[in-house]
Image (cartoon, helix red, strand yellow):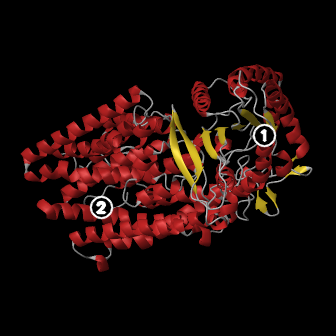
Amino acid sequence: MQERSPGYFPHIDGLRAIAVLAVILYHLKASWLPGGFTGVDVFFVISGFVVSASVDRLPAVGGWAGLARFYARRMRRIAPALVVCLLFTAMLSALLIPESWLSETSDKTGRMAFVGLSNWVLASTGNDYFSPRTEFNPYTHTWSLGVEEQFYLLFPLLFLAWAKGPRGRWVSLGMFGVAVAASLGYAVFRARQGGHEIDAFYLTTTRFWQLGAGVLLFQVLSLSGRFTPLTASPRGISWRSPLLLLSVGALGYGLWSARPGHSPWIDGLWPVLGTLGLLGLLQRAPGGWIGRALATTPMVTIGRLSYSLYLWHWPVFVLFRWTVGLETVATGAAALLCVALLSWLSWRWVEQPLRHGGRWRISNARWVAVGVAVLVLGAGLQTALVKTEQYTSLSVVSRAPLDWYPYAKGLKKEIPDCRVRVSNVPVQGGQARLYERGQCPGRAASTRQLFVAGDSHALAYHEMLQRLAVLDGATIRLYGSGGCALVGLRAWQGPNPACDAYVRNVLEDIQARAQPGDAVLLAGLRLPRLSEQYTVFDIAQVRAEHLSEAADAGRRAEVASWIAQLTPLAERGVYIVLEAPKPVLPAPPYRCSDVFNRHNPICVNGMTVPRSEIEQLRAPVLAGLQQVADALPGASIWDPMPLLCPGEQCLPTREGKPLFFDGDHLSGYGNRLLLPDFQAQLKRLEATAPAAAP
């Protein structure tokens, strides 16, 4: 067995190796170790145990000097490698990852990771650890570092009495016991309450008990005189073997069977108990077969590299997902090779020199001050990298944002003397966007109101509507809720009470505000998606379900329902405009348009689709929309299809510019392309006398 220096126990590095390998295996392919994400729970227990032992081993120093020493040691341990990893990740993210729904929280998560608050960001944005957006966020893994750093802020306050003699040790033990019990109770409460799985997973309040359990284990062992290993036989003490096996079983059960949405309670309990058992028993009998297995050279080596491995594996995996993919054996092996290389370089040239190098011997207070300054500077550099993406990125999406994103940011340069005012107005159960023309000399204002309602595809008309407000002077209200199209003709897929409530509120608001001669555009995704931003669909199955008898029956029932709901508006002289289905693409253009990502598995079906296939999918939907239009006075159908797909193949681009951002949402250029045609649609309505109100 490897020679140990005082205070070092190789089996602890072996446990670290198990924890980091479990996490890496889970992140590489979750089905290989379904509960592997609880390897982080193992890390928490080990961290609480080791930090207590390391503080206890040092000469007692009280007051501010003791706090400075503690935080300086933690700063040297955590900050250098973290800053290097975060900046390297930020640089590659700026080069390779465009802004999108999948990456919308990444930049903020990375920025807050420098100051130990990324777990709060992830909790506040509602990004479940097991959701697609976290899988494509290269900083998601820093949530656990945030928990540890926040724990370290509290640790000295509760451990302070430990150095005050026997009585102080019992006081510290009691304080940690109370804190652990409170955190565990809160975790159980949140789990039983339901609906708080995201907060419970990320927040320190529900995780403190796992780190605190490690502290309590050290304190109990120390008070009982069992922290220092005894000189026992290499085989260990035989009566402890069943307890060791139970501990191994609890740890293995947790790593295999933990379920998403059940952590840290109750599925985080088993790896915690297993780790506590192994730490406690192996401190007493490190020479047994389990202790020898954990102390082997490969396990100890991986354990020593565990922090670097944990830091680097996730951003490497995510960057592979964004570029060449991570699904094949070749890409998986290449990713693991990158992780191993970067981790060793980080450990050898960043961690070790700054932790143990003689040239960095400065006072503890200065270490803390310098560390804080470097972290703040790192956050600023990450922000600068994000803001300069348009000029530095390798992605065509980031380099041409005005064409890809429907944000209308180029409008000010095109029409410098006009402004559009965008505001949010309350609607029961949500809000709507209001577009109004501001100062605009020499342009006549329209008295017409336009109401636009639907799902995210209605929201994707953001640029077209802003331009319309400036050019025509119309007042426009945009109502949008993801997945909730009006006259979507897809309700046959299953009930959605939340969408039903949203639709009622929107129609009531329009009914209260619309006047005769106003128009209502009902836009939305009415065809089945052929692709998603993060997964590949079985197109044949999607097509079969959309054209099935069950779908036809559902559409017929929905047509009758929508006629009844829209008739009061139409009879008041309000024009109902139904958007005909736009093309849907088999792959998202923003993820497949660069040389470094066009061979990603997400792009396997290509970005073009025959027009005949889209027309086949559109036929039953168009028939339903026509029935609605025929039943409503003054209603009409606006069809963007001829402009978006003029040839035999529906393409993702036109004249080298993107028509779509992802597989079905319009790009900024697509908005500008459709604007004149939609203006013509509104002019045709103006030429028609309003329907007489009853």
Q: For residue 191, what is the image quadrant?
A: top left
- Asked if one can make out residue 577 in the rendered structure from this viewpoint, the answer is yes
Q: Nearer the viewer, residue 474 or 299?
A: 474
Tell me residue 387's x, y (percent). Answer: 53, 67
Q: Amino acid at mark 2?
A: Arg
Kindly identify the amino acid type of the residue bearing the numbered disc 1: Leu
> How far apart in space, not on screen, are marks 1 and 2 (Cα)?
69 Å
Task: Tell me where residue 18 appears, x and y as whole percent.
Answer: 45, 49
Q: Residues within 10 Å of mark 1 (few under 14, many from 20)?
A: many
Q: Where residue 294 sits: x, y (%)?
A: 41, 50
**Residue 675 place in picture, x, y as percent:** 75, 52
Q: Is residue 89 left or right of residue 393?
A: left
Q: Is residue 289 visible?
A: no
Give the image quarter of residue 594.
bottom right
Choose the circle earlier in sequence order: 1 or 2.
Answer: 2
Q: Which mark is residue 508?
A: none
Q: Relative to 452, is 373 above or below?
A: below
Q: Nearer the viewer, mark 1 or mark 2?
A: 1
In the rendered view, tell whether residue 495 sits above or below residue 220: above
Q: Which residue is mark 2?
A: 74
Element on which disc 2 rests: helix
Q: Disc 1 marks which residue?
A: 685
Asked if the residues shown at circle 1 and circle 2 are in contact, with their CB atoms under 8 angstroms apart, the answer is no
Q: Secondary structure at mark 1?
A: helix
